[in-house]
Image (cartoon, rainbow, N blue to C red):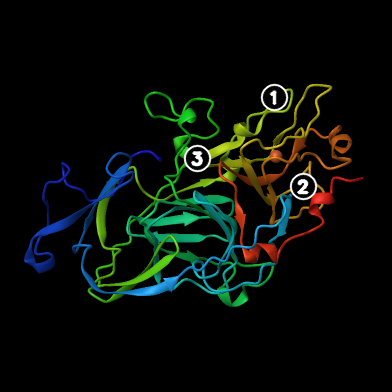
Amino acid sequence: MPPYLKLGSVPRKRHIEHRREGGFRGEGIYYEEVITTAGFGRAYSICYHLRPPTRVKKLESAGAAGIELAPEGALRHIHLKTGAIPRKGDVISGRVPLLINADVAMARCRPAQPQTGLYRNAAADEVIFVHRGSGVLHTMLGLLPFKPFDYVVIPRCTTYRIEFTPPTPPSQWGDESGPDLLIIEAANTLEVPRKYLNPDGQLRMGAPYYERDLHGPRELEVIDKEQDTTVLIKDGDRLTRYTLAQHPFDVVGWDGMAYPFTFNADDFEPITGTIHQPPPIHLTFEATGFVLCTFAPRMLDTHPEAVKIPYVHSNIQADEVLYYVRGRFGSRRGVEESSITLHPRGIPHGPHPGTIVASRPVTRTDELAVMVDTVRPLQLTRAAMELDDPQYPYSWME
Ligand SMILES: [Fe+2]
């Protein structure tokens, strides 16, 4: 997880009184909340509220997320053209789930309107990859600015609201402008890869990124409001609406290592070689059941006889998803920005005809893509099948 961070006012020691004048009910303290991960066994933060965060006035069922899976068709390569998904809803309700298994769910979101209510995912860490748009993630741990090509990593149980900022106001969001997101939900804890950490827990020299590249909240937003505030909570498919007696963003200080953060894909330092390097060099984050990788702009292989694009492979025991973000994708034909390909286990895929020869004079690639490799097979949703390019499995024929 990201390194230790401290914002605002915290007492000298953990779990002692954080005193204040007056305060809620005249109790003269700020109210401690410990935010833990993996039970109490992994990274945690300790924060201090103006009011106890447990004051629930009302709770009610809010239905279900209702993901509809497509009937299982033949085993084949899939190409989804997701760039023109019609805008709808906000950054929560406008999500279009596409690929899912027990460990990971991937959705695209092209919101049509700003998020007004608060949202909390109680059962999954979220990674919001910002293809287009910039703004601020509002949380009780503070304000986290984000920009294009950021991974916004939001630990489960973070209550949040996303505010997109100009240049494009919501009234002008259209097909080509406005926020455009890829959303990855991790059922298991999302982590900085263990292999990137030295025995002291610091990112190793030579790892593709450094603590300085991970950005946490910069300033607190302390909302002191005794007013009914609703939070939509999602845990798995179930939605529940909670009405709290206060605004939950009332934290005056916190410290620890469990907090939302950003990492920009352009800060990923690619590892290159004289000959082709295998996909694990692109590893960015991992969770039980899948890895998330960044194919960043990089020098291509320098050996005079190198084949500069990936060899054919059959994804033994892995399903491979690529989301194409930016640039020219040297090994692919027919994919475009915002395409998603799924190359499932057991059938070979590799460079498209003509791409090996075309790559010979090329010395670098400007491609940016996000890859998700899963241990368990992925299922497609009905919404995904509406974006399907049925000819894709035959695209390797000359
Ligand atoms: Fe592949």
Depth check, mark 3 against mark 2: the one in front is 3
Please state the horizontal and vertical placement of residue 33, each as a whole percent of the image.
22, 53
User: Where does ligand 1 appear, by image quarter?
Assistant: top right
* Secondary structure of the residue carrying numbered label 2: loop
Q: Amino acid at mark 3?
A: Glu
Q: What residue is rendered at 9% in x and 68% in y?
A: 25
According to the picture, the residue beneath numbered tag 3 turns out to be 286
Label 2 C-beta lies within 8 Å of the nearest ligand 1 atom: no
Circles 3 and 2: CB atoms closer than 8 Å: no
Q: Amino acid at mark 1?
A: Gly
Residue depicted at x 71% and y 44%: 367
Q: Is residue 29 above or below residue 376?
A: below
> Which label's residue is closer to the chain start, 1 or 2?
1
At a point 84% along the width and 50% down the height, the residue shown is 394
Q: Is residue 332 above or below residue 118?
A: above
Tell me the residue that label 1 is attached to.
273
Residue type, numbered disc 2:
Arg
